[in-house]
């Protein structure tokens, strides 16, 4: 029986209780990776994904942690290391998307979005990379968004800033830790068919969006996961410091 592409690797995916994070976790599991499933508030969702991972024949660990807090991320990575011996693949997939006029954003709200959307990725890399460095192999993937590259969404200054910052962080990590066998990349989903709070998307009419996408449909979480699969497999090992846009041709950079 051929060896699966991620056999022997351990992947930690934050925000993996649903939507894109869940799809990434399940895709990694299907390729043989041990998977650490993370959520913040919905334990039942995390447990459900753990069960799905195990049903695919992979090992799984569910850990509840608020990844906007450095100490919580340290605990998350420590739990993964205790169970599986380390983290080989770290995927930061968390975010809050507030629709707020710029002059109505308070410093506290700005800081909350920065901690959740950007600092969480810094914390994850900070705690996962030392082990990767020791093993001379690692993959860091930061899930951003197309608003961080085109800034087409109004009244989301904090989110746009954080999403753009994620790719800056990926490039910095790629440059610094490439000599250690570690790659770092960004995946930027476009209009993906996920469960979401549509009150924060009143500026985006579904039918209008569909008309703007050359493929004429919303993307699927599995299609975002496919980009992560490439970046985290050995065959994707020469891709680093890059961004893969998964948006059906909606925006071309």
Image: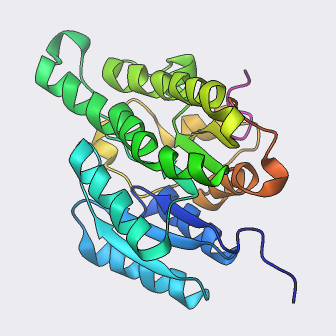
Residue 202 visible within the image: no
What residue sits 24% from the left and 52% below the top? 72
Residue 235 relative to residue 37: left or right: right
Give residue 215's position: percent from left, percent from top: 76, 44
Residue 176 visible within the image: yes
If the image is split into quadrants, where does the C terminus sit? Answer: top right
**149 shown above or below 194:** above
Tally of numbered tags: 0
The residue sitting at the front extreme is 134
Along the viewing direction, whichever of 204 and 177 lies nearer the viewer: 177
What residue sits 70% from the left and 30% below the top? 242
Along the viewing direction, whichever of 67 and 94 lies nearer the viewer: 67
The residue sitting at the top extreme is 103
Q: Which residues fall within the magenta stretch?
A: 245-253
Give residue 124's position: percent from left, percent from top: 41, 45
**191 shown above or below 23:** above
Along the viewing direction, whichever of 198 and 161 lies nearer the viewer: 161
Q: For the stretch drawn in magenta, what is the main secondary structure?
A: loop
**55 shown above or below 188:** below
What residue sits 51% from the left and 26% below the top? 169
Give residue 175's position: percent from left, percent from top: 65, 24
Give residue 211's position: percent from left, percent from top: 66, 36
Residue 79 relative to residue 148: left or right: left
Along the viewing direction, whichever of 202 and 243 lies nearer the viewer: 243
Does the stretch in magenta take in 85? Answer: no
Residue 162 relative to residue 133: left or right: left
What residue sits 43% from the left and 62% below the top? 16
If the image is split into quadrants, where does the N terminus sit? Answer: bottom right
């Amino acid at each position: 029986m051929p060896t699966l592409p991620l056999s022997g690797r351990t992947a930690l995916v934050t925000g993996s209780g649903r939507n894109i994070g869940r799809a990434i976790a399940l895709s990694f599991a299907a390729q043989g990776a041990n998977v650490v499933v993370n959520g913040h508030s919905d334990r039942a969702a995390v447990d459900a994904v753990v069960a799905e991972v195990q049903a695919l024949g992979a090992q799984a660990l569910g850990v509840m942690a608020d990844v906007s807090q450095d100490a919580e991320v340290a605990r998350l990575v420590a739990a993964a290391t205790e169970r599986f011996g380390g983290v080989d693949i770290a995927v930061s997939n968390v975010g809050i998307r507030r629709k707020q006029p710029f002059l109505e954003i308070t410093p506290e709200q700005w800081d909350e979005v920065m901690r959740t959307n950007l600092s969480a990725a810094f914390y994850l890399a900070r705690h996962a990379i030392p082990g990767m460095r020791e093993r001379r192999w690692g993959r860091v993937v930061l899930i951003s968004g197309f608003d961080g590259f085109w800034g087409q969404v109004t009244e989301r200054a904090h989110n746009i800033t954080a999403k753009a910052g994620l790719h800056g962080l990926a490039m910095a990590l790629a440059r610094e830790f490439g000599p250690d066998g570690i790659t770092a990349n960004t995946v930027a989903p476009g209009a993906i068919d996920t469960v979401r709070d549509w009150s924060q998307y009143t500026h985006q009419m579904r039918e209008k969006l569909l008309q703007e996408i050359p493929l004429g449909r919303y993307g699927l979480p599995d299609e975002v996961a496919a980009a992560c699969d490439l970046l985290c497999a050995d065959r994707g090992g020469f891709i680093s410091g890059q961004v893969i846009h998964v948006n059906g041709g909606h925006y071309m950079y």
